[in-house]
Amino acid sequence: MKILLLGNGGREHALAWKLSQSPHCSQLFIAPGNAGTAKCGENVYVNINDFDAIREFCIKESIEMVVVGPEEPLVKGIADYFKADPALQSIAVIGPSKEGAQLEGSKSYAKAFMKRHNIPTAAYQEFDISNYEEGIKYIQQHALPIVLKADGLAAGKGVIICNNHIEAFAEFELMIQQSKFGDAGKKVVVEEFLDGIELSVFALTDGEHHVVLPSAKDYKRANDGDKGPNTGGMGAVSPVPFADEAFMKKVNERIIIPTVAGLKKDNIDYKGFVFIGVIKVGEEPIVIEYNCRLGDPETEVVIPRLKNDLLGLFLATANGKLSEVKVEEDLRVACTVMAVSGGYPGDYAKGFEIEGLQNAENEHSIVFHAGTKAYQDIVMTNGGRVLCVTSYGNSIHEAVERSRQVLEKIYFEDMYYRQDIGYEFI
Ligand code: AMP
Ligand code: GLY
């Protein structure tokens, strides 16, 4: 089977690594990919948001399946584009329709979905310019901290947790009156702050049935001790120790099953991943957010722990046969530690040579590339998150230690990584 995978992050390297191991995968293209994905298949320079260019490539190469890594093409409707075109209809797309991708593309849409289907989430109200004054009153009377969320996609920056009312008024005004996040912030969801510990839950659905993948916990803050600014993710562990059988049973019954049933009830075409950001408040799971894709860097621990043939899972998804599949997890722990460019998530330089990659991997550890680019035999930095090292272990401590040992062999200028991934479980 000939596959086109869209994206260029660590998530896509992990997906490419796994897909390339499938006996059903005859050829794998990655657009645009990175220096790591180039080792699993062929990188091609097609813009992932240029659907006409993707169409042309798929026809030329007789692609049979398109796997969409990031949210943007999904929110822009790539699945609908394929469905509407007779020349593309037979190509399986792993990723939801534009409507389904609204679970990530619009916080307001996601909140209404959860309300409609009785899925536990934080209490909220939404505001825009038409009820701005009402919003000010709502914030004034609201307990602290208070959470403000830009409705649309805001590159992970659209959620602001305010510890006092003055800050909340200022942010509210900036979003609605000053278009701080452009159109994405013209509508704002104001919600209750939930105090608890977070985990990332991944389901794969064919629109009718679903399977649950291994759970993961992501470390979003830039510095040790969960300090510093929010990033795309500095590391992850899987499984999550507090997500035991009893807790995951609640997640499945109260959140995953109603979500998949809700999609069906609402007639939403959804063949792909549902990433549910869950917070454990006391013993209860509550949804913080939905995404219409896998997480990054969660994928770099979830996929290595998946024993199934990933392409087999995707084929079952495309054919509505996920009820026939059972997910098998590697019992080992996996952790990943992300090495980033100095300055990330703020300004950083690119184009530094990465040294020490040749003999970095071993039986316990895999190096997944994110922001990297190859020039002949030289691999250069090409982004904020540069690469991550995933290791297996019998404990989180052992896995993290193994990743750290591998990272000590790798060098690029101003390379930085957190030392304490998984700290609360060690
Ligand atoms: P999101 O962009 O929705 O993933 O939100 C980013 C982060 O903000 C989440 O991962 C949480 O850490 C935090 N967050 C979002 N909503 C809430 C909430 N209601 N209570 C507490 N933290 C939240
Ligand atoms: N690691 C969080 C995300 O992918 O959104």
Image (tube, grey):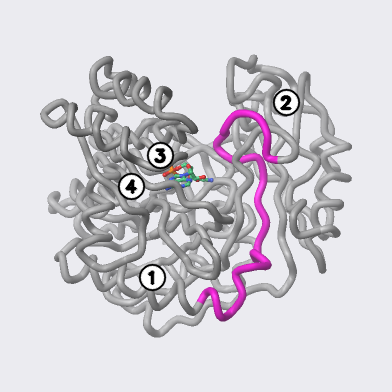
Contact, mark 2 vs mark 3 (Cβ under 8 Å): no
The amino acid at mark 1 is: Ile
Q: Which is more N-terminal, label 3 or label 2?
A: 3
Q: Who's the residue at 18% across and 27% down the image?
A: 133
Report, in whole angstroms, how far the alpha carbon at label 2 lies from the one at label 4. Answer: 37 Å
Q: Which residue is mark 3?
A: 147
Contact, mark 3 vs mark 1 (Cβ under 8 Å): no
The amino acid at mark 4 is: Glu
Image quadrant where one finds the N terminus:
bottom left
Q: Secondary structure at mark 3?
A: strand
Residue 30 % position (x, y): 48, 43
The amino acid at mark 3 is: Val
Report, in whole angstroms, how far the alpha carbon at label 3 lies from the one at label 1. Answer: 24 Å
Tell me if residue 38 can be seen: no
Contact, mark 3 vs mark 4 (Cβ under 8 Å): no
Mark 3 vs mark 1: in front: 3
Q: Which residue is mark 1?
A: 256
Q: Secondary structure at mark 4?
A: helix
Residue 98 % position (x, y): 22, 48
Is 86 or 238 nearer to us in this picture? 238
Q: Which residue is mark 4?
A: 104
Q: Which residues are magenta?
A: 226-248
Q: Who's the residue at 43% across and 66% down the image?
A: 203
Q: Quarter-wise, where is residue 266 in the image?
A: bottom left
Image quadrant where one finds the C terminus:
bottom right
Q: Mark 3 packing: few (<14 Cα in 10 Å), some, or many (20+)?
A: many
Q: Which mark is residue 378?
A: 2
Q: Which is more N-terminal, label 4 or label 2?
A: 4
